[in-house]
Amino acid sequence: MKKLPNLDILRLFLACAVVLFHIPVTMDSLGFNVSVPLAIFKKGDEAVSFFFTLSGFLILRLLFIEKTEQGNINIRDFYIRRVLRISPLYYLILLAGFVLYHVLLPVAGLGKPPDYSTGSMLAHFTLLAPNVFIFSHKVGPILHVLWSIGVEEQFYLFAPLFIFLIPKNRLVAGLGMLLAISLVLCLGSEFLYRNRMNYYYFVFGGLISILSYRYDLRKVFNNPLFRWTVVGLFFLYFFTELIPLKDETKRVFAMMLSGLYITKIADYPQLIISNKRLNYFGRISYGIYMYHFVVLTFLMGFFRYVIDLRAHSGPLLVALFTVAALAATVFVSHLSYRYFESRFIRLKAAYRPDTPPAAAVPVPATPSGKELV
């Protein structure tokens, strides 16, 4: 499958939204009570929901293409690709958080003793169930961000098995049924709901992605009223508080909006953003998400001991901290991508589905007539 447009830009936006969401929290821990009126500083949960849908949109489409074009999927290679892309950075952050919270801070006489067993914590995190542990215990912000990676990995364990077992001509119907089941279970089970096992985001993203790949949906997605409604709702959702939804209603709305918006900008784009630098920042968005609390923790120490908080106005300090946080996080993520993650990404290429060389494969066109670039 050729690279889809605009998704790197979306990844960058979503990763930055998560960073902005945690800035007021971090500054409050500095002892500086800040109030940030901009709505985008409150949209971390919304950004993670979009990330979930985007993952399903891409992963389930890839599995669908492999199943329909090659007759079946190579489950082993799928798992290897996921491990090589996700696990190295996941376990690096786990190690960093463990050393900081369980070794360095206790030695320095800082922090509170944990209210949990270290062995239990490591078992949950190592076995990709951090969300189950995190929402019952306070583990520190560097480790807290790993909950969403756990949810993704739980879905990745199941998704290829589902696609493997369902006949090709039943995949769309099967995903529709899976979506209904996941909605009922995830919203109806207190355990699944509390631990954010929102698998329906992935399923809906994958279902609409496959429908868009199989059928010409131009009449729907290029309809001016539909287009501007989806785009308008996206901006209202992230930049205002004018969509006051909560709990189950908010999650279902986010699922539908994220799936429709991603499909619109990727498969039926009116505008393709091709700025190389911005697209590169989008490619390193996994690092931006994973490293941002490491950076915020060090910035917190710097601001606490170097800057006299009382001598600065609230807005000025927020602006300074925000710029420093974003710049430092992008820089650290760049170094990680270039010198650490890229090693595993190169290994991952050897386990891609067997397809003819790119030049010998007709490039599929979007329903709008544009190539998937």
Image (cartoon, grey):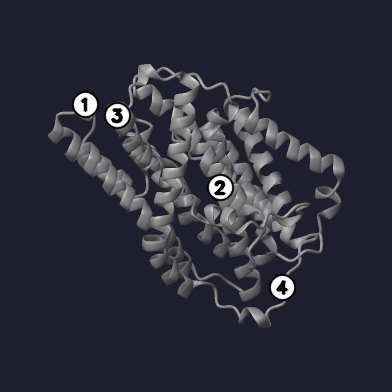
Tell whether 105 sits left or right of 130. left
The residue mark sitting in front, 3 or 4, is 3
Q: Which residue is mark 4?
A: 363
Q: Quadrant of residue 39?
A: top right
Picture layout, residue 240 above or below residue 162: above
Q: Earlier in the sequence, mark 1 or mark 4?
A: 1
- Residue 358 falls in image quadrant: bottom right
Q: Residue at x 68, y 60 (%)?
A: 170
**Where residue 276 sits in the image (x, y, percent)?**
60, 59
Q: CA distance from mark 1 to mark 2?
A: 35 Å
Is disc 1 in contact with disc 3, using a CB cutoff of under 8 Å?
no
Position of the C terminus, as image quadrant, is bottom right
Could you tell me which secondary element the residue under label 1 belongs to?
A: loop
User: Front-most of 129 and 168?
Assistant: 129
Q: Position of residue 134 (x, y in %)?
A: 36, 35
Q: CA distance from mark 3 to mark 4?
A: 55 Å
Amino acid at circle 3: Val
Q: Nearer the viewer, residue 160 or 45?
A: 45
Which is more N-terminal, label 4 or label 2? 2
Image-based side of 170 in relation to 304, left or right:
right
> Which numbered dot is residue 12?
2
Q: Judge depth for marks 1 and 3 and give the one in front.
A: 3
Task: Residue under label 1, please give it.
Answer: 112
* Left or right for 255, reference 227: left
Q: Which residue is mark 3?
A: 306
- In primary-sequence order, the first of circles 3 and 4 is 3
Residue at left offset 67%, top offset 25% = 243
Is tag 1's residue or tag 2's residue first in the polypeptide sequence? 2
Q: Indicate the secondary structure of the residue bearing disc 2.
A: helix
